[in-house]
Image (tube, grey):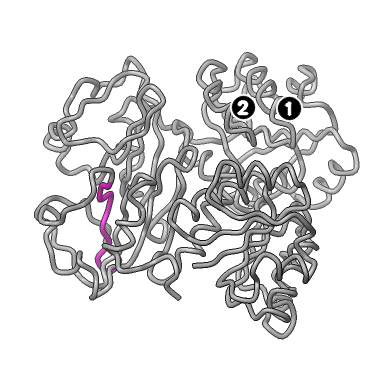
Amino acid sequence: MKVIICGAGQVGWQIARQLSGEKNDVTLVDVNADLVRRATDTLDVQGVVGFASYPDVLEKAGARDADMIIAATHSDEVNIVACEVAHALFSVPRKIARLRAQSYLEESYASLYQRDHLPIDVVISPEREVAEAALQRLAAPSTFDTESFMLGRAQLLGIQLDEDCPVLNTPLRQLSDLFSTLRAIVVGVRREGRLFAPDPGDQLFADDQIYVFTHSEDVNRTLEIFGKQTKKQERIVIIGGGNVGLGVARALERRTDRVRCKIIEKNRAIAERAADSLERTIVLNGDGMDMDILLEASIDRADAVLAVTDDDKTNLLVSVRAKQAGCRMAIALVNDPTLAPLMGALDIDAYINPRATTVSSILRHIRHGKVRAIYSLGDAEAEMIEAQVLSTSPLAGRLVRDIEFPEGVLVGGLMKGDKVLKPTGDTRIEAGDVIALFTMASDVREVERLLQVSIDFF
């Protein structure tokens, strides 16, 4: 498949790395020559320097025979025009645009993206993706990562194991016997910086970070088995009243359970806009780094602080200060993935990487056909893929134990009709079933072959 990616920043580079690693023909376009050079030097991609919305630049990038354009520059307007030019002049079949401005995303203006108006097939909103990720972290407060699958009936939980975890040094096979009714499977383990798919004989150790795929009804029990307390979040302080903070506060206000939420925003105009947009949320105009304003927001009695300003260092420092003041849980928005290893040392419970959430969302739309959801793990080291099994798939009609999955692939869950099952070796996979697979990045192509859904399947 031939793909043009507009924007060689973090998201564009990550998507380019993913697609070029899967032997697709990828061309990166960016006005910054240094970013293009970095991409062409480190990835198997072609590069074009220029404005992504210019027809001659897109033609130079090969738009005349491109299968897809992904517009992910820092400018919404450039992304829109790039898709318009790709459609009008070059008839590019599939167009994906990343848009940040909330005005473009209002439901009342949804007709804007019809083919005879702005022909954009998929619109990705980083702020909405991040806000949704934040809400999922709040819903499972003792996890460092979480994502919904199978229409919300299943969850992927990232759990940091502590010294007091009751199931340390126990083979995973034995865990399955001990908790036979628990609909949960450990699909991934990160140990000493390396992520891998565990074998049934592998044990878990303190400081391991594990990924568990579980039925939504068994989330609390799963957390308790791995030594985590489950407590309802009733008092939440949000640092940053921009689009992400505002989106989270609005969602919390819509919930039936009464959550007390406060926002601290440094910019007065943004604070006033947030106050006008919210009904029950208290908005304080001040610096989240100021301990006096934190105490005014009752940070010492808060169940969680969510630091979502546009500055990584502010988010980290506010989280540390909030925890020291007595806040039970801290979640920080962190754009720079190299800061992730600091989370444990700083006693920050969870972090959200906007790049990872946006990349996962874009991949979900690239992997078309019967692939229903994709979640990128770590630094694109692995993926959780949810897909419907086709009748032509080598999986259809076979028992799990008879399928030769690659070493880095594990079956996390299976949905038959509307019922989510914990798969065993004796589980038979049928056409029409929905399967959730943990796969290391190197095995993605083989998984797509097993699912009979290629990356260019439309």
Name the residue beneath numbered marker 1. Answer: 297
Q: Are marks 2 and 1 in contact (CB under 8 Å)?
A: yes
Instruction: Decide whether the magenta segment is chiefly helix, strand or loop.
Output: strand
Q: Could you say whether the residue bearing mark 2 is in a helix, strand or loop? A: loop
Q: How many numbered marks are there?
A: 2
Measured as percent of width and height from the top left, residue 110 is found at 69, 74
On screen, residue 213 versus residue 343, left or right, reads left
Packing grade of label 1 (10 A; few <14, some 14-19, many >=20) is: many
Classify 365 as above or below 441: below
Q: Specify whether residue 413 is painted magenta.
A: yes
Q: Specify whether residue 259 is painted magenta.
A: no
Measured as percent of width and height from the top left, residue 120 is found at 66, 73
Q: Amino acid at mark 1?
A: Ala
On screen, residue 439 versus residue 6, left or right, reads left
Q: Which of 282/84 is in front?
A: 84
Q: Amino acid at mark 2?
A: Ala
Name the residue beneath numbered marker 2. Answer: 302
Give the magenta-colored segment's residue range.
409-418
